[in-house]
């Protein structure tokens, strides 16, 4: 990534990780890891790709900020995050991006297995 983008990238990266604090714990962990991987993967891209990368992540941050505010004001409803991705937009994705999106969807829709409570039949002393 070129030098003129570095401060913008850092600010955006921090902003996204801060916004992730409003997500449920399992989505926060998944989102944080995904952001870290994507930003690391795009560290050395050219100027044009860096600009597109930043625009997409800035749009993501704007949507997440808006949804976080809406969810805060509608505390009686279950929090909702994400947007609908129309099929025509998917047609613009490269095969690698489709694969990443499928992996992300699989991770995001897994049943929550973060905590497992099992009862022991024998008391532990």
Image (spheres, rainbow, N blue to C red):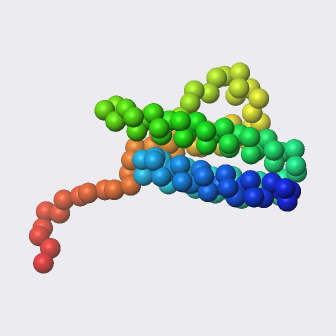
Quarter placement of the C terminus: bottom left
In this view, which residue lies farthest toward the bottom? 125
Residue 92 sits in quarter: top right
In the picture, measured across the screen, residue 104 lies left or right of residue 8, that is left
Residue 103 sits in quarter: top right
Give how far across and how far down residue 89 sits, in percent: 71, 26
Residue located 61% across and 57% down the image: 14
Residue in the foreground of this view, choosing between 37 and 72: 72
Residue located 70% across and 58% down the image: 10
In the picture, measured across the screen, residue 95 lies left or right of residue 20, that is right
Image height check: is 100 above or below 13? above
Give how far across and how far down residue 15 sits, in percent: 60, 52
Give how far across and how far down residue 9 sits, in percent: 73, 54
In the picture, measured across the screen, residue 125 lies left or right of residue 60, that is left
Residue 36 sits in quarter: bottom right
Residue located 53% across and 49% down the image: 19
Give how far across and how far down residue 40 sits, in percent: 71, 59
Image height check: is 44 above or below 75? below
In the picture, measured across the screen, residue 115 lies left or right of residue 22, that is left
Residue in the foreground of this view, choosing between 119 and 105: 105
Q: Is residue 41 visible?
A: no
Image height check: is 89 above or below 65? above
């Amino acid at each position: 990534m070129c030098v003129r983008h570095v401060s913008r990238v850092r600010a955006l990266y921090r902003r996204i990780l801060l916004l992730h604090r409003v997500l449920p714990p399992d989505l926060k962990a998944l989102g944080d890891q995904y952001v870290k991987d994507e930003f690391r993967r795009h560290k050395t891209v050219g100027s044009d790709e860096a600009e597109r990368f930043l625009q997409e992540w800035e749009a993501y941050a704007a949507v997440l900020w808006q949804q976080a505010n809406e969810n805060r004001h509608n505390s009686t409803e279950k929090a909702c995050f994400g947007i609908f991705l129309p099929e025509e937009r998917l047609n613009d994705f490269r095969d690698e991006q489709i694969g990443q999106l499928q992996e992300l969807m699989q991770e995001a829709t897994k049943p929550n297995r973060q905590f497992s409570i099992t009862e022991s039949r024998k008391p532990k002393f």
